[in-house]
Amino acid sequence: MATMNNTLSAPILRDTHLCSPAAGANVSGGSGSSSVLTRALHAARARKMYQQKQLADLFSDIGDQQKELVRQMGFDGLLSMRLTKLNKQFGAWILCKLDPSSGNLFAGSKHEICLTCEDVSLLLGIPCGRKQILPAIKNEVKDVKAYMCEIFEKDSFDGITIATIQRILEKKFTRTMTVHEQIVFKTAFIIFVVTKFLAPQSVNNHISIRYMKALVDVENIHKYNWAEFVLHEIKDAAAALQDKIRHRKSIGYINGCIILPELFYLHHLDFGTDTPGHENISRIGVYNDSMIAEFIDRDVILKNRKPFPAYGKMKLRNRHVEKCNLGHPTGATEAAHVNRSFDT
């Protein structure tokens, strides 16, 4: 997740295959110097940290009625999120190692780690239903926008802002919510978490209509494949970032839920007795800021490499034991040392 208001000059990378999907197991940082990119990533970190903190604070503060509505929608895993910070350099680096076609890490190498919709569901605690989230076609857009204006009592779709949505979510109830209030809350909650966390598209909190057909069917939100939607978004973000760096374009804003590939990668590292257990909750609820920071620091090979530190020090857990299954370990965890500093 990286956000930048200003236009950046593209970094000059001596490691020209840094963001190439064909790089496979090469997961170390580049060796080129790019102070512009580094400064931009640090600036972006502060903005995204604020958004993460907003989410964690909001989730911890909503009332019991609203929490039950979140559970009905199948998004209750997000309520356990304690993360308020994000390492932008690590996030950008991991996106450079994610194959935009498959969504897998280190694709094409013997150390490839498969990322599925089921993994996304277990990591984030969001639904992985059978109904696909499809964008509204041209002649449906007007009707979808009109429905949203009706729900939020606005004269135009442009009047639906993230500030408006947040006020709805922060509203306190000392009585039982009406059916209409429940529908308004459910709709607002999905818009907020998609815009702020699951599939952000701009630093200005642009509210996109691309998933809103599913919100018209609000009582069946849990039946939609939100995990697939988020996975597609992060694959698109990886493709865009890799293309920009490869062609030395300005980086701009990095879309998508960057914490997703970060958690997926860290889950597959062997931290010995510090490795988080397999509690039957969303994986995002297992981690806190200090744990993530420590794990990332322990995986650093060279901290001062530019534009990203070189990562890949820790061993990967044996993929044949884990079988890429986050929720159901198949036995004792084995570790395999993987040299991710060069292609294999």
Image (cartoon, rainbow, N blue to C red):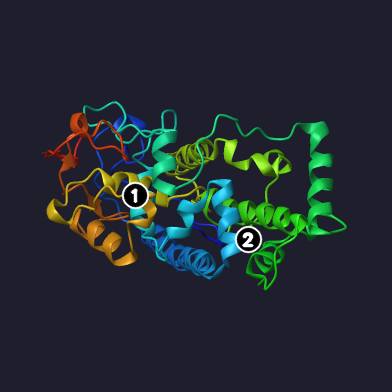
Q: Position of residue 17 (x, y in %)?
A: 31, 37
Q: Residue at x 55, y 62 (%)?
A: 6
Q: Earlier in the sequence, mark 1 or mark 2?
A: 2
- How busy is the neighbourhood of tag 1: few (under 14 within 10 Å), some, or many (20 plus)? some
Give the amino acid type for the residue marked by disc 2 in the picture: Asn
Q: Is residue 224 left or right of residue 216?
A: left
- How busy is the neighbourhood of tag 2: few (under 14 within 10 Å), some, or many (20 plus)? few
| Res 204 label | 2
| Res 113 label | none
Instruction: Please say if 309 is above or below 240.
Output: below
How far is the residue under mark 1 from the one under mark 2? 25 Å
- In what quadrant of the picture does the C terminus appear? top left
Give the amino acid type for the residue marked by disc 1 in the picture: Leu
Q: Position of residue 315 (x, y in %)?
A: 15, 44
Instruction: Please tell me in which quadrant of the rendered image residue 109 appears.
Output: top left
Q: Residue at x 40, y 63 (%)?
A: 83
Question: Tag 2's secondary structure?
Answer: loop
Q: Position of residue 145 (x, y in %)?
A: 80, 46
Instruction: Please say if 305 is above or below 134.
Output: below
Q: Is residue 300 visible?
A: no
Q: Position of residue 180 (x, y in %)?
A: 77, 55
Q: Is residue 203 left or right of residue 138?
A: left
Q: Is residue 298 left or right of residue 174?
A: left
Q: Residue at x 63, y 58 (%)?
A: 205
Q: Is residue 155 visible?
A: yes
Task: Say which of marks 1 and 2 sits in front.
Answer: 1
Q: Is residue 47 left or right of residue 290?
A: right
Q: Tell me the residue that label 1 is attached to.
A: 263
